Amino acid sequence: MLVAMEDLAPDITRQRLLIEGFFTIDVDEDVIRAFFERITTAMQLRTYGAPTIFAPEGDGRAENQGYDAFVPLIDSGISLYVWSGPRFMSVILFTCKHFDSSTAVQVTREFFQAPQVASREF
């Protein structure tokens, strides 16, 4: 059962969105950079640094191999997690300004050619 979380800082604007789905494209570091460029442009979010991308390359469990990535935004950041084997991705947008969730979901689904995605604001 999901319990509502108390808003401890009602004067601070925050919006969070989780998007998950199975993708059909090949994903590597260049594709991740292109995704961050596409989503930030489509949503008019400004970055202040280059994306940071990690690939554990054999560390940890085989089923968890893939990428962990983050791009800093003027108004917070976007994290992307990619499981290469099952071709599954999870995106978390966290901003200190309001954005259109449906645009974020559409851009992510189209970019990753994901036949179906699930999303939730929190």
Image (tube, rainbow, N blue to C red):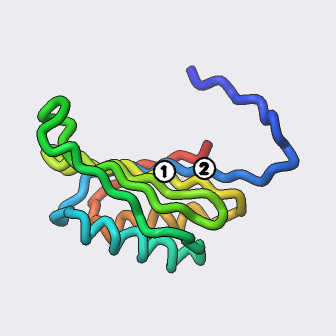
Query: Left or right of 41: which side holds 81?
Result: left
Query: What label does residue 31 carry, if any?
Result: none
Asked where in the image residue 23 lies, by quadrant, the reply is: bottom left
Residue that appears at 33% across and 57% down: 53
* Total count of labels: 2
Distance CA(mark 2)–CA(mark 1) = 7 Å
Counting from the top left corner in percent of width and height, residue 41 is at 51, 79
Discs 2, 1 touching: Cβ within 8 Å = yes
Residue that appears at 69% across and 28% down: 4
- Front residue of 80 and 73: 73
Crowd around label 1: few <14 · some 14–19 · many ≥20 (10 Å): some
What type is the residue that disc 1 sits on? Ile
- Front residue of 1 and 78: 78
Residue that appears at 20% across and 62% down: 27
Q: Which residue is mark 2?
A: 16
In the picture as drawn, the residue positioned furthest to the right comes out as: 11
Counting from the top left corner in percent of width and height, residue 86 is at 16, 44
- Front residue of 31 and 54: 54
Q: Which residue is mark 1?
A: 92
Quarter holding the N terminus?
Answer: top right
Residue that appears at 53% across and 46% down: 120
What type is the residue that disc 2 sits on? Arg
Asked where in the image residue 58 lies, by quadrant, the reply is: top left
Counting from the top left corner in percent of width and height, residue 19 is at 44, 51
Counting from the top left corner in percent of width and height, residue 118 is at 41, 49
Secondary element at image label 2: strand
Quarter holding the C terminus?
Answer: top right
Crowd around label 2: few <14 · some 14–19 · many ≥20 (10 Å): some
Secondary element at image label 1: strand
In terms of sequence position, does the residue under pointer 2 or pointer 1 come before the other? 2
